[in-house]
Amino acid sequence: MSGANWYTRLVSSVAFPLHERLKGHTTVSVRRWLEATQWWPRDRIETLRVERLRRLLVHAQARVPYYRDLFRDRGFDPATVRSLRDLATLPFLTKPIVRASVEHLKAERARGLERFNTGGSSGEPLVFYIGKERVSHDVAAKWRATRWWGVDIGDPEIVVWGSPIELGAQDRLRTLRDKVLRTELLPAFAMSEPKLDEFVDRIRTRRPAMLFGYPSALALIAKHAARRGVDLSRLGIRVAFVTAERLYDHQREEIERGFGCRVANGYGGRDAGFVAHECPHGGMHITAEDIIVEIVDSADRVLSPGEPGEIVVTHLATRDFPFIRYRTGDVGVLDDRDCACGRGLPLLKEVQGRSTDFVVAADGTVMHGLALIYVIRDLPGVESFRIVQESLARTRVMLVPAPGFDASSERAIREGFRARLGSGVAVEIERVPEIPAERSGKFRYVLSRVPVQ
């Protein structure tokens, strides 16, 4: 493929397939299948999804204690499923249910399950299990997406990430694997000035074909390099994949300008799977062969394309630990248009963020945190910030000031916030030396503790 040298071809066609086979994964065959099915017309993809959904539900009834009991109590016969709309007859799978029923969600006689957990940024971490089928399909979906951008397994890659799972498992075997695959991990936990200098040096030395990481972290590295007068735009980087956080327009601009490459936005998670990724034509393609996405409102009604609501995911490659109608807590919008690339995969129009990225005014009006973010971003002398809505009556701003930030800046923040949240809202501004990332390494501009109704 374009830009692939002999080493990349060796890794992608020999070393990586051998690695996956030894682990009992079917990643290579799944990726080949996905590269064929992506060009199918939508109606054929829809037929495939219904068939796979029916098989998953029948399997869950036969092998998974939680769903066996649920289907019996509801009088639900999975063999009668004829449409994706039939999913709406089933209740949602929520994080509290997973926590309470984790053992009953395991399929009987399942082998090789791996224990995973989310970071718990909004509360208690979520523990769940993933089987080899799910791993194979998720890795294959990512692999397909990187090839959309001319990047293959074995091309040099730098990952800016903060998950304790990755950072805590750097044993000899994993280190050897990463060396063979030419993947280098930079920890997003520590983003101090000296560390950022190190990151810039590593990127210049490695000259990766692609970057992968949090948009906040990649944007920070790009800005830091610019401040240092270091040009990273001529290294031959083909694409920067970003995920795990909302991608803001200013971050896309900073990354593209700083690294001289396009940004490919992605959406997914350890729990939900590899849900969607952006192609070079700008479409956020859902991994439709494996993933069913529903958008629901606060009354649990399934919404039409174009309407924002909570993202609910059914992962069709989760027979060992099924995720069926799983509430992600994220807010997004489906799109019913066709992408110019010609793929038949349906589209996510927008991922607006987690439900906690929204704030609620004193009168009950719900608005995205951007309404407050822009108040601060327009001010001079702001190095970084985080907004925490503690209650309808109190919002706190942690802010790292820079030259130019003064009492009038604080006044502008209070006036701007009160204009949006309500004139009686207390706005507290704390000047701090730094704002740490979350335990996972992610960074969030807005955190609301007020439930969105």
Image (tube, grey):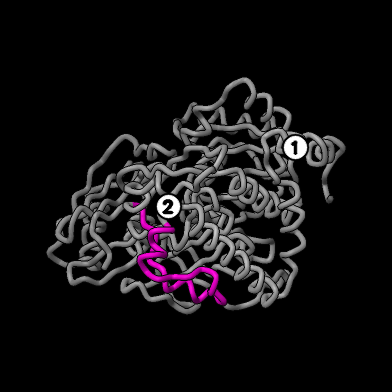
Mark 2 lies on residue:
65
Q: Tell me where residue 340 appears, x and y as whole percent.
A: 70, 73
- Name which residue lies at 83% across and 44% down: 4
User: Where is residue 177 drawn, in percent x and y?
Assistant: 68, 29
Dot 1 or dot 2, earlier in sequence = 1
Residue 21 coordinates in the image, percent (x, y): 73, 37
Circle 2: element type? helix
Mark linked to residue 305: none
Q: Mark 1 or 2, which is nearer the eye?
A: 2
Q: Does any portion of residue 26 appear in the rendered image?
A: yes
Residue closer to the observer: 105 or 19? 105
| Image side of residue 261 versus residue 323, left or right | right
**Residues tagged 1 and 2 counted as in contact (Cβ below 8 A):** no
Residue sitting at x 75%, y 50% = 29
Mark 2 surroundings: few (<14), some (14-19) or many (≥20) residues within 10 A: some
CA distance separating discs 1 and 2: 36 Å
Which amino acid is tagged 2?
Pro
Region of the chain picked out in magenta, as a range: 67-95
